[in-house]
Image (cartoon, helix red, strand yellow):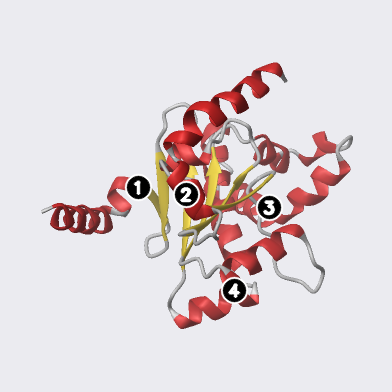
Amino acid sequence: MPHFAAGVVRFQTEVFPEKQELFESLAKGQSPEALFITCSDSRIETAMITQTEPGELFICRNAGNIVPPHTQQTGGMTASIEFAVAALKVPHIVVCGHTECGAMKGAMNPEGLDSLPHVREWLGYSRAAVEVVKHLGADLDDDAKMKMLLEQNVILQLNHLKTHPSVAVRLAMGDLQLHGWVYDIKTGDVTAYDEATGKFNPVHEHYASEMAALALEKHQCAA
């Protein structure tokens, strides 16, 4: 804890004063650009990966970056999704998986979770992705199977998102976009799901036109 306490002191004495204007504006409210759903894994640092400032992402984290399908039973993920989409009106939702995911390893081998009954039950929300890998990836090696599972789980959770009424309404209105990503811890690579092709491509390729338009807009503003 002394390490964390020292970090708080540095934040208060060094970081906060430099960004005081930002924090003063954030004290008045929030208007995040995206709901970012990712794993609780300590190696995932959302702000570092996306290079975002406080207030830009509304973040939900859990084991396996899972979105339970909508039911009448209230849960933390359901409430957070509803608030982000219906109240904060985020225009984007990102579901971001990652390599070396312990949750996905557990989903692939549930027999090893007997001592973690709540984890085993939670990972049941990934079962459909596991079944896809078992049927389509039977001839793959373990690394390739895990890569397929990471991607299939992201796709599955995107489909689960569509069952939430607040999400369904915004999608029907055309002012909400869903994104599926997979982050590679070792290389720093991030791939994005292309629903039209069913493939995951590097983010710089997937968002090439949007990034070019943003760069042009910034250039015009600076001119």
Lower position in the chain sequence, tag 1 or tag 2: 2
Query: Looking at the picture, does residue 111 appear above or below residue 159?
Result: above
Q: Alpha carbon of mark 2 to alpha carbon of mark 3: how far?
A: 16 Å
Residue carrying label 2: 181
Q: Residue at x 27, y 58 (%)?
A: 210
What kind of element bears circle 1? helix
Q: Residue 4: x, y in percent?
A: 66, 23
Q: Residue at x 82, y 69 (%)?
A: 73
Q: Residue 156: x, y in percent?
A: 59, 59
The answer to whether residue 55 is seen in the rendering is no
What kind of element bears circle 2? strand
What kind of element bears circle 3? helix
Query: Looking at the picture, does residue 69 appear above or below residue 54?
Result: below
State left or right for residue 29 relative to residue 174: right
Q: Local crowd at mark 1 within 10 Å, few (<14), some, or many (≥20)?
A: some
Q: Amino acid at mark 4?
A: Ala
Query: Do the residues under discs 1 and 2 have CB atoms within 8 angstroms?
Result: yes
Residue carrying label 1: 203
Residue carrying label 3: 126
Q: Local crowd at mark 3 within 10 Å, few (<14), some, or many (≥20)?
A: many
Q: Alpha carbon of mark 1 to alpha carbon of mark 2: how far?
A: 8 Å
Residue carrying label 4: 86
Q: Amino acid at mark 3?
A: Ser
